[in-house]
Amino acid sequence: MRAPLKEYEAVQEAAMKFVKSVAEGNSKYARELFIDEAVLFGYLDNKLEHGSIEQFYHNVDTVPGGDHFKARVDVIALEETLAVVRVLEEGWGNRIDFTDYLLLLKMNDEWKCVAKAYNQNSNTIQR
């Protein structure tokens, strides 16, 4: 059975904390979304990033989204306590395009992110 639309909206609203942090270059909002134990996996300019979500916070806090930053949030899957969200980013730091996948769990009636994996579009890799 499909979840009600209000649940999709709640997941999208949670994921927008991620987008707002990236756009503003301030991890404050993302810190509300991710649990302390959340993990990060992906390649940034061909270098593997993995481990604590703290690396993501560092990236966000040191590189502003950019003048032309744009993002789109898609709720890919939603079950009772599990959601998969795709975030398409263009122009992070006025240079990089990403596709992010966020894994969210509903914890204490609130959607929280437990993992982020991403792909940097190959035409934006700095060599």
Image: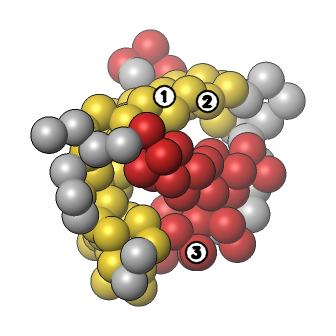
Q: Residue at x 52, y 68 (%)?
A: 33
Marks 2/3: CA–CA distance = 19 Å
Does label 2 or label 3 sit earlier along the sequence? Answer: 3
Kind of residue sitting beneath label 3: Arg
- Residue indicated by mark 3: 31
Q: Which quadrant of the structure image shows residue 81?
A: bottom left
Residue 79 place in picture, x, y as percent: 20, 51
Q: Front-most of 59 and 107? A: 107
Position above or below: 41 against 9: below
Marks 1/2: CA–CA distance = 5 Å
- Residue indicated by mark 1: 88
Q: Secondary structure at mark 1?
A: strand
Q: Residue at x 59, y 65 (%)?
A: 30
Kind of residue sitting beneath label 1: Leu
Residue 42 place in picture, x, y as percent: 30, 48
- Residues at discs 1 and 2 in contact (Cβ within 8 Å): yes
Residue 61 place in picture, x, y as percent: 70, 64
- Residues at discs 2 and 3 in contact (Cβ within 8 Å): no
Marks 1/3: CA–CA distance = 20 Å
